[in-house]
Image (tube, rainbow, N blue to C red):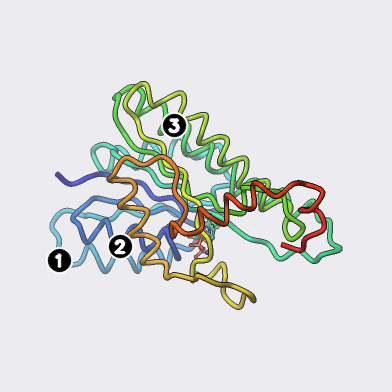
């Protein structure tokens, strides 16, 4: 049966590829982001020639937290229900080694963490009532530890991880799946020009891994899986050594 899915942060990268993969499988998808032109491009491609739309678009800035419930309700109404929700919106601000910038920190927390809370809370309430549903949060391996490079990005992803774990602990008793996704390096607009990347995979490959994990009922994944080893090592390094490293 065709699923009904909302994807927040679907105008490019991982979110856009998840949308396209699901649309190819025949699912009905609402895609959400600020860049309407990019959303429309996906909608035109997949709605072409159809009597009934399979893609709905919502132009939205996730920092407008107060609008999330209304837009969530609209998406559910337009699609005639909801089975899965993906939160993929995120930013990675460039922070210099000697920079401490509260404006950038607030923006990062707002988009990467609080926007997720604003969209996933209505979904949690909806799924709890139905006793069915799947919530997928695209976090990052960067949330496993506080590092020298980008304190607020690390913090935003750690917050998202803990929030998703709490949702899972609340909702699994109702048969609801909550999946935390921790990608390593993925080739997207976010990482364009970034130096020192390794084990890079395409956004399409990442999307396929994430969809498979969703379908299989998984709760925590690294993308691709070999990043789990890095995650484990990073978590085990004692603080007195970690603070001397530049990673
Ligand atoms: N690429 C990597 O290596 C990597 C690694 C680990 C984790 N991740 C995570 O994966 C997720 C997707 O990133 P990506 O790599 O696919 O990068 P991307 O292509 O830059 O995608 C980011 C998405 O977030 C949306 N977004 C940003 N600010 C927003 C806002 N204020 N309101 C609504 N949507 C907003 C963007 O849409 P608009 O600009 O149109 O609003 C876009 O759709 C992010 O959470 C990122 O932290 C990526």
Residue found at x 29% / y 29%: 132
Where does the C terminus fall, quadrant-wise?
Answer: bottom right
Residue found at x 61% / y 78%: 193
Q: Secondary structure at mark 3?
A: helix
Label disc, if present, on residue 49 of the rendered structure: 1
Percent position of residue 85, x then y: 37, 43
- In the figure, 100 relative to 126: above or below? below
First-in-chain label (3 vs 2):
2
Q: Tell me if mark 3 has few (under 14), some (14-19) or many (20+) residues whose alpha carbon lies within 10 angstroms of its own.
A: some
Q: Are marks 2 and 1 in contact (CB under 8 Å)?
A: no
Label disc, if present, on residue 118 of the rendered structure: none
Towards the viewer: 216 or 71:
216
Label disc, if present, on residue 20 of the rendered structure: 2
First-in-chain label (3 vs 1):
1
- Tag nearer the camera, 2 or 1: 2
Q: Secondary structure at mark 1?
A: loop
Residue found at x 49% / y 66%: 186
Q: Is residue 191 left or right of residue 74?
A: right
Towards the viewer: 143 or 66:
143
Q: Secondary structure at mark 2?
A: helix
Percent position of residue 22, x then y: 27, 56
Q: Is residue 167 left or right of residue 126?
A: right
Percent position of residue 190, x then y: 56, 67
Whether label 1 lies within 8 Å of ligand 1 gets the answer no
- In the figure, 44 relative to 1: above or below? below
First-in-chain label (2 vs 1):
2
CA distance for labels 3 and 2: 24 Å
Quadrant assignment, res 104: bottom right
CA distance for labels 3 and 1: 33 Å
Q: Are marks 3 and 2 in contact (CB under 8 Å)?
A: no
Can you identify the residue that label 3 sits on? 122
- Tag nearer the camera, 3 or 2: 2
């Amino acid at each position: 049966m065709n699923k009904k899915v909302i994807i927040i942060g679907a105008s490019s990268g991982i979110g856009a590829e998840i949308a396209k993969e699901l649309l190819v499988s025949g699912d009905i998808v609402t895609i959400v982001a600020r860049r309407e032109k990019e959303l429309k491009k996906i909608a035109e491609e997949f709605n072409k020639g159809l009597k009934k739309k399979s893609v709905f678009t919502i132009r939205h800035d996730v920092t407008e937290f107060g609008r999330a419930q209304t837009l969530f309700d609209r998406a559910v109404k337009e699609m005639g229900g909801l089975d899965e929700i993906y939160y993929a919106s995120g930013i990675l601000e460039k922070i210099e080694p000697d920079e401490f910038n509260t404006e950038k920190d607030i923006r990062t927390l707002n988009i990467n963490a609080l926007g997720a809370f604003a969209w996933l809370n209505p979904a949690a309430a909806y799924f709890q009532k139905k006793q069915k549903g799947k919530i997928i949060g695209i976090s990052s391996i960067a949330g496993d530890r506080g590092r020298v490079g980008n304190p607020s990005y690390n913090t935003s992803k750690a917050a998202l991880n803990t929030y998703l774990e709490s949702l899972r602990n609340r909702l699994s008793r109702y048969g609801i799946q909550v999946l935390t996704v921790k990608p390593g390096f993925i080739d997207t607009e976010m990482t364009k020009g970034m130096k020192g990347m390794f084990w890079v995979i395409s956004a399409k490959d990442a999307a396929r891994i994430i969809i498979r994990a969703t379908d299989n009922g998984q709760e925590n994944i690294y993308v691709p899986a070999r990043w789990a080893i890095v995650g484990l090592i990073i978590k085990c390094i004692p603080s007195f050594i970690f603070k001397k490293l530049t990673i």
